[in-house]
Amino acid sequence: MNSVETVLTEEMKEMLQGQTIVFCNVYHPQVGKVLSSALSWVFAIDNNTIRFAVDSKSKILDIVRNHGDVILSFFASESVYSVSGPSSLVVEKADKMTLKMAIIEVDVKEVRNITFYGAQITQEPRFIKTYKESLIKKLDNEVKEAVFSY
């Protein structure tokens, strides 16, 4: 994919189901700089919509409340992709969750392969969650349910 696309591919949609490292970048005018955050609870709802969960006190919410554009970057298909579009706040504090999480939605407007020329990603980043296994499953399930239920 060298051209600019307007929707996620099926492979990207499958990849973005809450277990991939995704970098979120937003420009915060009051702070005067770009804020960057690494996320894992990022879900492609369909080929045009991505939702993700962040702490309800995150500075990202300031941008989203003003419908600021969000850029999400992630590794997939031996490349690095950037997805951008306007964001909106789905819910500021999701109900019935252990953590106080906000759900943000991004309307996919642009999908770009941002891998530098001549590169092929040979290994995607992997991570482990370092808290109790029972809590990992509980939180992952709560977030996924919240993201898809609102």
Image (cartoon, rainbow, N blue to C red):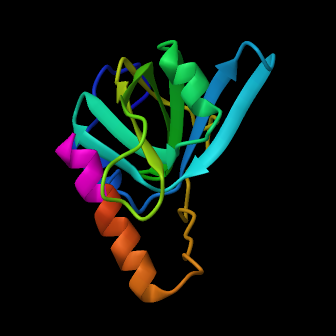
For residue 96, above or below residue 49: below
Q: Position of residue 13 (x, y in %)?
A: 27, 45
Q: Position of residue 26 (x, y in %)?
A: 62, 25
Q: Position of residue 3 (x, y in %)?
A: 41, 20
Highlighted magenta segment, given as a residue range: 144-150
Q: Majority secondary structure of the magenta segment? A: helix
Which one is in front, 104 or 107? 104
Which one is in front, 107 or 13? 107
For the image, the number of numbered tags is 0
Rendered residue at 28%/31% (across/down): 49
User: Picture quarter containing residue 96?
Assistant: bottom left
Q: In which quadrant will I find the N terminus?
A: top left
| Magenta stretch: includes residue 134 | no
Q: In which quadrant will I find the C terminus?
A: top left
For residue 145, above or below residue 113: below
Rendered residue at 36%/17% (across/down): 109
Rendered residue at 59%/32% (across/down): 60
Rendered residue at 36%/60% (across/down): 97
Residue with the most extreme right position: 32
Which one is in front, 35 or 58? 58
Q: Position of residue 50 (x, y in %)?
A: 33, 36
Question: In the image, 12: left or right of 118?
Answer: left
| Magenta stretch: includes residue 145 | yes
Question: In the image, 48: left or right of 42?
Answer: left
For residue 89, above or below residue 20: above
